[in-house]
Image (cartoon, grey):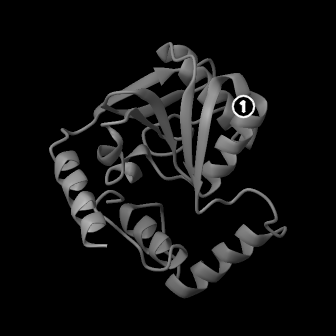
Amino acid sequence: MILLRALILLWAAKSANAGPPTQAFVQLPTVRLHYLDWQGDGEPLVLFPGGCQTAYVFGDLAPLLIEKFRVFALTPRGCGQSGAAADGYGIDSHVDDLLRFLDTLGIKRAVFAGHSSGGGIVVRMANRYPQRVSRIVTFDIVYSGVPEQFEDRMEQAIASKIGSQGPPSLESLRANFQAWELGVWSSALE
């Protein structure tokens, strides 16, 4: 156990030396998407967040992966600095964005990692385009088996807990996220 802890600390120390990611945009046919590029060595790894999180949510994780992967994180359409999309926000639209992101950057195959609903999106990516996906990683996945109206009821419960926050703001996002995600907030989310 002590050896494992020492290895993790050594790995974290090496990763802490990683510089900040490069911020960039890709213009796809129906939307402009924001992404972060941590560089790195190895196979491309595309991180995709859940909900309407941004690529910055991976700020703590991505530097730990650059020794083995070329790490990208994509902000979904309509979120953060990514543009609004006239053609909708369904799961297949996000999958098409991932495919076009690869095409735009000239990436033939990649590892995809998705958090929460982003996990469902990378699973669908692997199902629709298996030749473009070498592996998938999902964590805290929301994909299937979610009862109808679950999100609406959850949002109503959160609104009753935190009250009306007025127009969207960092403060309202923080309060909503803390209620939804059991109080978790980090510098990467900030």
Place of residue 119 in the rendered image (x, y in percent of width and height, measured from the top left)? 63, 50
| Left or right, residue 61 beside residue 159 | left
Sort mark 1 into few (<14), some (14-19) or many (20+) by Cα contacts within 10 Å. Answer: few
Q: Which residue is farthest bottom?
A: 161
Residue 124 is drawn in which quadrant?
top right
| Left or right, residue 91 beside residue 56 | right
Q: Residue at x 37, y 68 (%)?
A: 171
Q: Residue at x 36, y 36 (%)?
A: 68
Place of residue 42 in the rendered image (x, y in percent of width and height, measured from the top left)? 39, 27
The type of residue carrying mark 1 is Asp
Residue 90: in sight, yes or no? no
Residue 116 is drawn in which quadrant?
bottom right
For label 1, the residue is: 87
Q: Quadrant of the C terminus?
A: bottom left
Place of residue 136 in the rendered image (x, y in percent of width and height, measured from the top left)? 61, 42
Above-or-below relation of 6 to 44: below
Place of residue 160 in the rendered image (x, y in percent of width and height, measured from the top left)? 60, 85
Q: Residue at x 81, y 69 (%)?
A: 149
Above-or-below relation of 25 to 150: above
Q: Quadrant of the N terminus?
A: bottom left
Q: Residue at x 25, y 72 (%)?
A: 2
Closest to the observer: 144 or 147? Answer: 144
The number of discs equals 1
Q: Secondary structure at mark 1?
A: loop
Above-or-below relation of 107 to 158: above
Residue 117: in sight, yes or no? yes
| Left or right, residue 40 beside residue 175 | left
